[in-house]
Each structure stands twice: as structure tokens, then as C-alpha cells.
Image: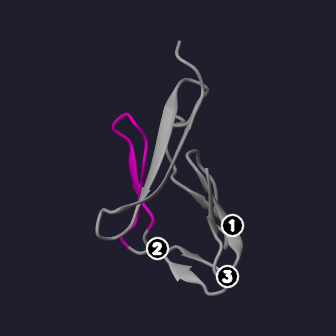
Amino acid sequence: MEITNTPRTPTGLRGWTLRDNDINRYRLDDLSIGARATNRIHTGNGRDTRTDVFQDRRDYVWDNRLHTATLRDDRSRTVDTETWGRRC
């Protein structure tokens, strides 16, 4: 999953969440996105970098089935959603 910050100023995402349409939720604490930059959120295992963050889950969350990702700010307001895939 990619999150892009389009303004000319960095954005801190403390308290923000990324959810799918199942029961999976990931808090984006300690994540900051630079001005006009993109960060990738991976569900698998890995080592966090400035631009890539790993949820360290054993099973992957995102697949080709009908799925919706919802990004919410620290007040639970929906910032963006993205839907993709097909019904099985």
C-alpha cells in the first residue's frame, strides 16, 4: 500500500490508521511522510526505513479479492479510501 503526501510540507501520521474491509488495522505511529513524498506500507516482515514500513504480519492482508483500504486520521476521520480487485 502506498501513501502519498502531496503538500509542500511534511506530515506526521501519529495516531492515524490504515484498515481493510476485514478486521485488519494498522496504526501508523512514528511515521512521517516528507513533502511530496510517498511511503509504502508492507504487510509482511521486513526492516523499516524512511520510505518503507513493515507491519510484520505472518499473513498478507492485501490480495486480488475485492478489497478496500481506508486511511483515517488521529480523529478517526476518513482521509482516503481505495477499492480494487474482483469478487471471488
Q: Which mark is residue 35?
A: 3
| Amino acid under disc 1 | Thr
Residue in the image at 67% along x and 85% along y: 8
Label 2 crowd (10 A; few <14 / some 14-19 / many >=20): some
Q: Residue furthest left?
A: 75
Which is more toward the observer, 55 or 21?
Answer: 21
Q: Residue furthest top?
A: 88
| Residue bearing the label numbered 2 | 13
Asked if labels 3 and 2 touch by Cβ distance under 8 angstroms, the answer is no
Label 3 crowd (10 A; few <14 / some 14-19 / many >=20): some
Q: Is residue 52 left or right of residue 58?
A: right
Q: Is residue 23 magenta?
A: yes
Q: Which tag is nearer the camera, tag 2 or tag 3?
A: 3
Instruction: Tell me where residue 2 appears, x and y as whole percent.
Output: 64, 55
Instruction: Tell me where residue 6 appears, x and y as whole percent.
Output: 65, 73
| Residue bearing the label numbered 1 | 38
Residue in the image at 36% along x and 70% along y: 15
Determine whether the residue tagged by mark 2 lies in a helix, strand or loop.
loop
Label 1 crowd (10 A; few <14 / some 14-19 / many >=20): some
Residue stretch rendered in magenta on the structure:
15-28
| Amino acid under disc 2 | Leu
Determine whether the residue tagged by mark 1 lies in a helix, strand or loop.
strand
- Establish if 9 lies above or below 15: below
Determine whether the residue tagged by mark 3 lies in a helix, strand or loop.
loop
Which is more toward the observer, 79 or 11?
Answer: 79
> Number of callouts in the render?
3
Answer with mark 2 or mark 3, whichever residue precedes in sequence.
2
